[in-house]
Amino acid sequence: GFNCPYCRNYNANGDKTCARCKRYLPPRWVAQLLRNSPLGPNPVTTLLIGVCVLVFFAQLVDANNTGGLSFGLGGMPMSTLLRFGALTNDVADQPWTVASYMFSHMGYLHIIFNLMGMWDLGRRCEAEAGAGVVLTTFLATGIAGGVASVAWYGSQPYISSGASGAVFGLAGF
């Protein structure tokens, strides 16, 4: 027998579908490739976390270059957040911010707690439903959160950033 590459359940030789997750079991060589992916057993979760971390490091560099970042628990300067796609009520002129705001974060605690939730929920969802479902759920609920933010605040000035809406989407999954 061998382990399912998606949920790691042990299955007998000759099984066509996994007894646990009911997904098609690929040939052994495909399962081996999936298991030894450079992004690990949860490629979408790892990729999304990697993108958030890279954007946050770029934000740190930008904020440091403009002299606006305190390296305590303080937040990111508004100018940096705006340069990195934070959501504001100016969404009509910058519609891409409904998606880009998910990958920028306002500070250390903000990104730490978002990524802890993403790591925990993303791994579980990816093992149960697969990478495509996790990616679709993350992006769709994150964008829905951005649209809800725009609708809630209307013309009031605000700024929104972070993956919290997408993480809560994974929690609801």
Image: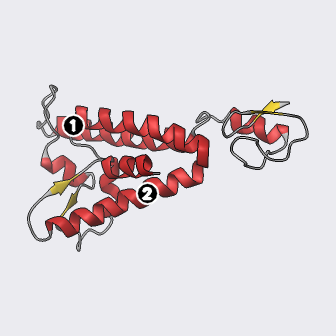
Q: Nearer the viewer, residue 118 or 36?
A: 118
Of helix, strand and loop, which one carries label 1?
loop
The picture quadrant where one finds residue 99 is bottom left
Marked residue nearer the N-terminal end (1 or 2): 1
Q: Decide which of 134, 62 is in the foreground and name it.
A: 134
Q: Residues within 10 Å of mark 1 (few under 14, many from 20)?
A: many
- 97, above or below 69, in the image: below
Residue flagged by tag 2: what amino acid is it? Leu
> x, y (%) of residue 165?
33, 52
User: Is the residue 147 above or below the residue 27 in the image?
Assistant: below
Task: Where is residue 71? Give x, y as percent.
Answer: 16, 26
Disc count in the image? 2
Instruction: Tell me the residue at 22%/66% (across/down).
Output: 150
Q: What residue lies at 37% left-to-right and 42% top-to-bottom?
A: 52
In the image, farthest residue toward the right: 14
Q: Residue at x 36, y 61 (%)?
A: 143
Pointer 1: what residue?
107
| Above or below: residue 50 compared with residue 96 | above
The residue that disc 2 covers is: 139
Q: CA distance from mark 1 to mark 2?
A: 21 Å
**In the displayed structure image, the side of residue 120 where residue 40 appears, left or right:** right
- SS state under label 2: helix
* Furthest residue toward left: 156
The outermost residue toward the front is: 19
Q: Amino acid at mark 1?
A: Gly
